[in-house]
Image: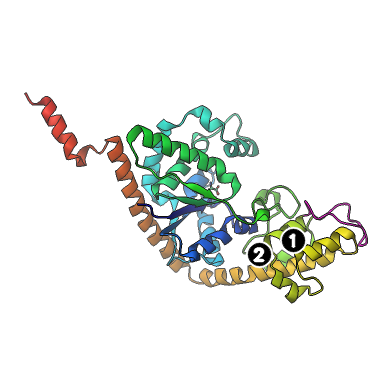
Amino acid sequence: MNKKIILTGDRPTGRLHIGHYVGSLRGRVELQDSGKFDEIYIMIADAQALTDNAEHPEKVRNNIMEVALDYLGVGLDPNKVTILIQSQIPELTELTFYYMNLVTVSRLQRNPTVKSEIQMRNFESSIPVGFFTYPISQASDITAFDATTVPAGEDQEPMLEQTREIVRKFNSVYGETLVEPEILLPSNKAALRLPGTDGKAKMSKSLGNCIYLADTEEEIRTKVMSMFTDPNHLRVQDPGQVEGNTVFTYLDAFCKDEYFAEFLPDYANLEELKAHYRRGGLGDVKVKKFLNKVMLETLAPIRARRGEYEKKIPEVYEILHQGSIAAEKKAAATLDRVKNAMKINYFDNEEMLADAAAKYAK
Ligand code: TRP
């Protein structure tokens, strides 16, 4: 072994937005092109999405294609990565069932991400069992592919922690079998948690504060121009605050020095622009117009590539189908190892058969 393997994924509950992009998609493409990984699996986690959408399977189903198009749009290359649909890999469910015995209810209750999700969904008194246990299923996703590296946002840290605990527990009970993964957080600090356009902590579809990868130029402009800034920066000449100012947070996440030469040559870089804003004399509209150009520059190639794939949906289906077949092969090998370690592979273990025969031999 000692291969370097990536597994990561997304729940298909909506189109992907720029929070996904800076938080993980952009990094995935870099990792894909880095040549440093032996295998890369990108999972469309439809089964996980169903854990809190059981009554709306069509929502999950319809968004599988949206997410796949977004993946291809940002430049994930099916020749370099395996894109798979979680529900098509039954081995994952089987692994989950065995891992469940290694995790306590109270441990799941302490998972901070699950905790806050339960609150957000008003599930407190009626949590679906599948939802409650999804961190265990996520441990199956990760370990099934022998993933060493899980690129994800910091909200996924508790899932990784839980996965590592399951791995250690499994290995100590049944012998060295599973690989312990690490999370890989985005290197750009602003990208760790991109706020919504309204300045709220998180981008979320229900809050209507997202910029989607597939948004048109017009939609992007409208959203950027109505963005939240410093509420005390009322007149152009007022000094403004940069920290916690959504427009600047976005610039931190997306801006490159070369954009200044192209779109705003009065400044050499973001630091100069921030200094001017802090000292006063720089209006929000000017900064927003610049951000709009930066966003268009970032998103135009993604939208164009997505558009090309929209014209060949059967090909995208085939990418998902072939990816899922390849992924199942990998997961099946891990499940074999797991059953072998647990000695529940009754019908393909000659030693066990010989032992049983010897035991009952008169
Ligand atoms: N929980 C992740 C999310 O909500 C999706 C996901 C499912 C995932 N399985 C995974 C992420 C395995 C990383 C690794 O976006």
What residue is shown with label 2? 215
- In the figure, residue 315 lies in which quadrant? bottom left
Q: Amino acid at mark 1?
A: Lys
- x, y percentage for residue 18? 64, 59
Q: Does residue 237 appear to the left or right of 49 in the view shown?
A: right
Q: Does residue 163 appear to the left or right of 237 in the view shown?
A: left
What residue is shown with label 1? 223
- For the residue with label 2, is its CB less than 8 Å from the closest atom of ligand 1? no
- x, y percentage for residue 7? 46, 53
Check disc 1 and report its element: helix, strand or loop. helix
Question: Which stretch appears magenta?
Answer: 230-245
Q: Is residue 115 a member of the stretch shown in magenta?
A: no
Estimate the spatial distance between the alpha carbons at disc 2 and disc 1, rounded to whole Å: 10 Å
| Residue 54 in sight in this render | no
Please state the total of marks drawn on the protein image. 2
The residue located at (48%, 71%) in the rendering is 312
Q: Is residue 237 a member of the stretch shown in magenta?
A: yes
| Mark 2 or mark 1, earlier in chain | 2
Q: Against 253, is 180 above or below?
A: above
- In the figure, residue 212 lies in which quadrant? bottom right
For this rendering, which residue is in front, 227 or 237? 237
Magenta stretch, main secondary structure, is loop
Residues at circles 2 and 1 in contact by the CB criterion of under 8 Å: yes
